[in-house]
Amino acid sequence: MSLLEVENINSYYGDSHVLFDISLRVNEHEVVALLGRNGAGKSTTLKSLMGAVKAHDGAIRFDGSDIRGLPPYEIAQLGIQLVPEERRIFGSLNVEENLQLAALSAEHPWTLERIYEYFPRLKERRRSRGTDLSGGEQQMLAIARALIRDARLILLDEPFEGLAPIIVQDLLTVAKQLAEEGRTIIIVEQNVAAALSIAQRCYIINNGHLVYEGTPDDLHAKPEIMHEYLGQHAPVGHAAAAPARARPLQAVGQVDIDARMPAMGLRHLPGKPGTHQALFEIARNVVGNGVLDVRVEGERRAPT
C-alpha cells in the first residue's frame, strides 16, 4: 500500500503555473528519487507536499487521508518532515537546543543519543551555535531535526548540494543506513549518481511536468532520457562527484522563527524575550495539545 499518493496537483507562484498535473506515489519503506534539471519543479513539488506551496486541484493522500490544503505544521504533526535546501537551522541556538526544539511537539521523539549514533560529529559539536557549524555539519543537523521527530516520510531537498565530496560520502552513508532500516524517503538531488544509489524508484520532472517513472536500472538503460532531461552523457557511475556549485552557510544570527516553525510542526505566539536562552526556555515550556507556539523577531546575537 502506498504511504503517499499524489494525483494531478497543480501549483503556482503568484500567477505563474509551475507544476502541471503532477502524480506520483511512494510506498512505505521505499526511497524515491525526484530528478530533473535546475528549475524543473522538484523543490516546488516537495514544498507542495509539505503545504509550504499551495497545491491546487487533485489530491495529496498520506496514509489514506487527504492532506492537500492543510497548513505545514499539521502536515508535520502527521509525520512528514521536510529537510529544506536552505537547511533553516537556528543559528543562535546550539546543536542540542536545535534538536530539543524540534522534538518538543513530536509524539515519539528520538533520544539525543540515538541521533548521535547517526551523526557522531554532532555530539562533538553539541554546544556549538548554528552559525559556528560548517556547511556539512549544518546539513547533518537539518537531517537530524527530521529524524528526532520520528518522521514517517522524510523529504530531502538537495541534501548534498555545495558540500565537499568527503562530506557527501558521509551523508550518503547515513542515507543508505536509513534506507536499509526501512525509512520512507523522497530525495531531490542534482547529484544523480548519489540519488540513484539509494533509490528503489525514480521520477524525472521537466518544466513542471513528470516525464519519466521507473527504476534506476531502467533509467540507466535509457541514455537518451538521461541526456535529454538530466544532461547525463553516459550511464551514471559512482556517487559523490564534486558538486556543481557551492552554497554559503544558511544559519542566521537573527532569531528567524516564522520560516522554521511550520516544518517542525510548530505555530506562533507573540513575544520578545530578552535573550536567545529565554527564547529556548519559552519554547521548551509553551506546549499545548501537541502544538508549540512561538514567535520572536528582531533580536541578533553579538558579533564574535
Image (cartoon, rainbow, N blue to C red):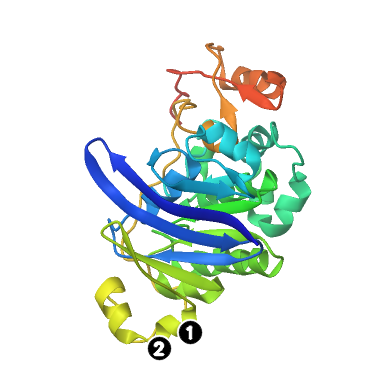
**Pointer 1 local density, CA inside 10 Å: few below 14, some 14–19, many at least 20:** few
**Pointer 2 local density, CA inside 10 Å: few below 14, some 14–19, many at least 20:** few
Alpha carbon of mark 1 to alpha carbon of mark 2: how far?
6 Å
Name the foreground residue: 188 vs 67.
67
- At label 2, which amino acid type do we have? Ala
- At label 1, which amino acid type do we have? Asp
Name the foreground residue: 239 vs 38.
38
Q: Is residue 252 above or below residue 268?
A: below
Q: Residue at x 77, y 49 (%)?
A: 113
Q: Is residue 245 above or below residue 202?
A: above
| Quadrant of the rendering where the N terminus is positioned | bottom right
Residue 84 appears in the picture as rendered: no
What residue does disc 2 label? 221
> Could you say where residue 139 lies in the image, as x and y percent from the top left?
52, 52
Where disc 1 sits, the SS reads helix
Q: Are marks 1 and 2 in contact (CB under 8 Å)?
A: yes
> Could you say where residue 299 lies in the image, as x and y percent from the top left?
46, 18
Residue 75 appears in the picture as rendered: yes
> Could you say where residue 290 lies in the image, as x and y percent from the top left?
70, 27
Where disc 2 sits, the SS reads loop
> Could you say where residue 186 lies in the image, as x and y percent from the top left?
52, 59
What residue does disc 1 label? 217
